[in-house]
Image: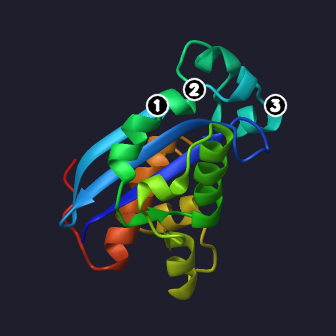
Amino acid sequence: MTFTAIDFETATGHPHSACAVGIITVEDGLIVEEYHTLIQPPDNEYWYRNIMVHGIKPVDTLQVPTFDTLFPEIHKRLFGRKIVAHNESFDRNVLAKTMRWYGLYCDELEIADRWECTVKIYRAKGYPKANLKYCSDRNGIALNHHEALSDARACAKLYLLHDGQVRMKI
């Protein structure tokens, strides 16, 4: 099983306000790379309620690059890949709207319009709750919730577990 799991955190309620991304690369059922970076959102603007969720503050991103500068690193990890996210519509929307904000086009990535979604998978399995924390706890997956890399890693492991894969070595 080969895919890429992704998770974004946002600075505001606007989907183009990505302030962190975690990307997990899985090849043949094995996690082979982890990528995480903070992203300076537009005008380095944050909403208090978003800070309360993920703990990232304007001071944390004041000196980090904006999405367009980081895009080459993100592009090489997503290009032509099967993408998996927990609540894929949120992360897909953040990617699309952030790219559009910076004049980039999703077609450049050659990825599907719809991604694999571990929320939908675990709902279909009959989980009474399908949020990332519940699914991770129930499956013994360590999670530092709302830290983009930890969320992406948990999503990758949930996707591997759903397919019966157990080789997770990183």
Q: For mark 1, what is the residue? A: 70
142 lies above or below 43 = below
The amino acid at mark 2 is Thr
The answer to which image quadrant residue 104 occupies is top right
What coloring was used for the rendering?
A: rainbow
User: Which of the marked residues, 3 or 2, is nearer the chain's N terminus?
Assistant: 3
In the rendered image, is residue 126 in sight?
no
Instruction: From the image, state whether disc 1 or disc 3 is nearer to you.
Output: 1
Q: Nearer the viewer, mark 3 or mark 2?
A: 2
Instruction: Kindly identify the residue that appears in the image at 74 percent across and 22 percent down.
Output: 43
Q: Residue 118 placed where, x, y %?
A: 50, 71
Label 2, residues with CA under 10 Å away: few <14, some 14-19, many ≥20 = many
- As shown in the figure, which amino acid type bears the numbered disc 1? Leu
Q: Is residue 27 left or right of residue 156?
A: left
Does residue 153 appear left or right of residue 39 in this picture?
left
Q: Pick the quarter of the image with the N terminus.
A: bottom left
Residue 145 picture location, percent across and down: 55, 47
Seen at 26% across and 45% down, the residue is 33
**From what the image shows, is residue 116 above or below residue 108?**
below
Q: Is residue 107 left or right of residue 110?
A: right
Q: Amino acid at mark 3?
A: Tyr
Does residue 130 lie above or below 4 as drawn?
below
Asked if labels 3 and 1 touch by Cβ distance under 8 angstroms, the answer is no
Element under disc 3? helix
**Residue 66 tag number:** 2
Circle 1: is it few (<14), some (14-19), or many (20+) Cα within 10 Å? some
State the residue position of label 3.
48
Q: CA distance from mark 3 to mark 2?
A: 20 Å
Q: Is residue 158 left or right of residue 146?
A: left
Q: In the structure shown, which secondary structural element does the residue marked by tag 2 occupy?
A: loop
Among numbered discs 1 and 3, the one appearing first in the sequence = 3
Of the pair 59 and 66, the residue shown nearer to us: 66
